[in-house]
């Protein structure tokens, strides 16, 4: 009678399963595992170095909130022909906030002057002296992505073209730059100017001896 011998490779696999998990092929448990199971362990560390602490005089007048969808598809090609198994892509969304305002250090206030009646073209002629406030152009003070808003919808890669963190940062930076250009060329700038005038006007008129004694005139440079 011939004896049936298992292949050496199959014997090694069975022994490894017994020693590590105590589970036979097919999912049957026999209740022991002599070696520790393989688990995943990760450790993330970060270190921050303070480079400078500088005084600022920025005055924020408007916050622009948005949601952006980013889609990046990349593939390697030869003379316009896409090489198979080299396409990677990812799609994600994030919420952002752009703060608009002015540099308070560039605000200039002119001495009160009495408007002469012949030079006053307004419908109502005021006898109050005018304080002229010269304001610098509205600019973007900050642009931030809300970390808890990032949501990934799709991502795929191959061993020939992997997704890299640098690519995600690059695409995000490009998208932020596009949004900043869009905002600076929109009516949002005028809204920021109106908001700045209203807020500064309220602040100045709250000072003793100003309300009812002077008129305010804002001049944008």
Image: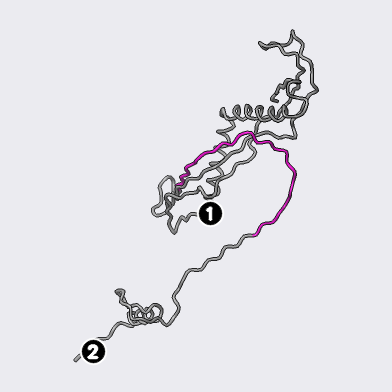
Q: Position of residue 141 (x, y in %)?
A: 65, 38
Relative to 153, is 217 above or below? above
**Is 53 covered by the magenta stretch?**
yes
Quadrant location, the N terminus: bottom left
Colouring used for the render:
one colour
Instruction: Magenta stretch: give its range.
Output: 47-73
Q: Earlier in the sequence, mark 1 or mark 2?
A: 2
Q: Nearer the viewer, mark 1 or mark 2?
A: 1
Q: Give the class, few, some or many, for how many residues have Cα within 10 Å of label 2's Cα (few <14, many ≥20).
A: few
Q: Position of residue 147 (x, y in %)?
A: 54, 49
Q: Position of residue 162 (x, y in %)?
A: 47, 56
Q: Give the class, few, some or many, for how many residues have Cα within 10 Å of label 1's Cα (few <14, many ≥20).
A: few
In depth, the one of 146 and 168 nearer the eye is 146
Q: Residue at x 64, y 28 (%)?
A: 193
How far is the residue under mark 1 from the one under mark 2?
Answer: 58 Å
Please name the residue that numbered disc 2 is placed on.
3
Q: Quadrant of residue 202?
A: top right
Q: Quadrant of residue 3?
A: bottom left
Quadrant location, the C terminus: top right
**Is 72 covered by the magenta stretch?**
yes
Q: Residue at x 47, y 42 (%)?
A: 69
Q: How many marks?
A: 2
Q: Left or right: where does residue 111 sit relative to residue 100?
A: right
Please name the residue that numbered disc 1 is placed on.
165
In depth, the one of 202 and 51 nearer the eye is 202
Q: Position of residue 18 (x, y in %)?
A: 37, 81
Q: Left or right: where does residue 46 sit relative to residue 215?
A: left
In depth, the one of 215 and 151 nearer the eye is 215
Relative to 16, is 212 above or below? above
Labels 1 and 2 touching (C-beta < 8 A): no
Q: Residue at x 62, y 60 (%)?
A: 46
């Amino acid at each position: 009678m011939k004896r049936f011998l298992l292949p050496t490779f199959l014997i090694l696999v069975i022994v490894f399963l017994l020693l590590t998990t105590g589970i036979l092929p097919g999912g049957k448990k026999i209740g022991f595992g002599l070696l520790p199971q393989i688990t995943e362990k990760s450790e993330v560390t970060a270190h921050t170095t303070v480079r400078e602490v500088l005084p600022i005089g920025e005055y924020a007048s408007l916050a622009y909130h948005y949601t952006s969808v980013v889609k990046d598809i990349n593939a390697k090609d030869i003379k316009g022909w896409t090489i198979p198994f080299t396409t990677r892509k990812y799609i994600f969304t994030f919420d952002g906030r752009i703060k608009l305002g002015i540099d308070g250090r560039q605000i200039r206030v002119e001495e009160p002057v009495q408007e002469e009646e012949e030079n006053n073209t307004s419908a109502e002629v005021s006898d109050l002296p005018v304080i002229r406030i010269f304001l610098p152009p509205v600019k973007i003070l900050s642009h931030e992505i809300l970390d808890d808003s990032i949501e990934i919808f799709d991502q795929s890669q191959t061993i020939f073209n992997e997704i890299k963190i640098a690519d995600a940062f690059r695409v995000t930076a490009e998208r932020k730059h596009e949004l900043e250009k869009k905002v600076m060329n929109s009516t949002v700038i005028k809204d920021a100017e109106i908001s700045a005038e209203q807020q500064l006007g309220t602040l100045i008129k709250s000072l003793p001896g100003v309300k009812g004694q002077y008129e305010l005139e804002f001049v944008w440079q």
